[in-house]
Amino acid sequence: MKTTLTFYKNSNTGGLVMKQHFSEISFESPDYFYDKNRKSIDIPDLTGFVEISEKKFNRESKRNGTS
């Protein structure tokens, strides 16, 4: 099993979303989405979001008052 994390930022609102995807498994698994506080959320509309690095995601999370 392989886990891939992808980080997104909304260029208009500054919202942050993290996507977790599992691969190399014998069954189909949905992608899981988390907000900047690492709390699970429903599948968001990713319109306006751009992919960013983990380093930038962590920096933006701290800037917005979260750890």
Image: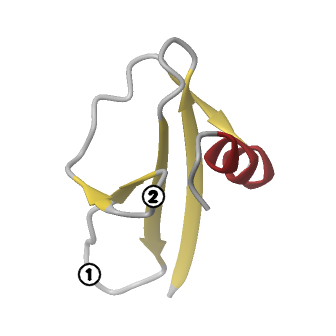
Q: Nearer the viewer, residue 64 or 50?
A: 64
Question: Neighbour class for label 1 at 10 Å: few (<14), some, many (≥20)?
Answer: few
The residues tagged by marks 2 and 1 sit, at their Cα atoms, a distance apart of 29 Å
Does 2 appear above or below 63?
A: below
Q: Percent position (x, y) of residue 20? A: 45, 63
Does 8 appear above or below 25?
A: above
Disc 2 and disc 1 in contact, CB within 8 angstroms: no
Q: Residue furthest top?
A: 12
Q: Nearer the viewer, residue 26 or 35?
A: 35
Residue 37's disc number: 2
* Amino acid type, callout 2: Asn
Q: Residue at x 44, y 65 (%)?
A: 21
Quarter of the figure with residue 60:
top right
Does 43 appear above or below 22?
A: above
Does 36 appear above or below 31?
A: above
Q: Nearer the viewer, residue 64 or 59?
A: 64
Q: Percent position (x, y) of residue 18? A: 49, 52
Taking the image as shown, residue 46 lies to the left or right of residue 43, namely right
* Amino acid type, callout 1: Phe
Marked residue nearer the N-terminal end (2 or 1): 1
Say which residue label 1 marks.
27
Q: Residue at x 63, y 35 (%)?
A: 51
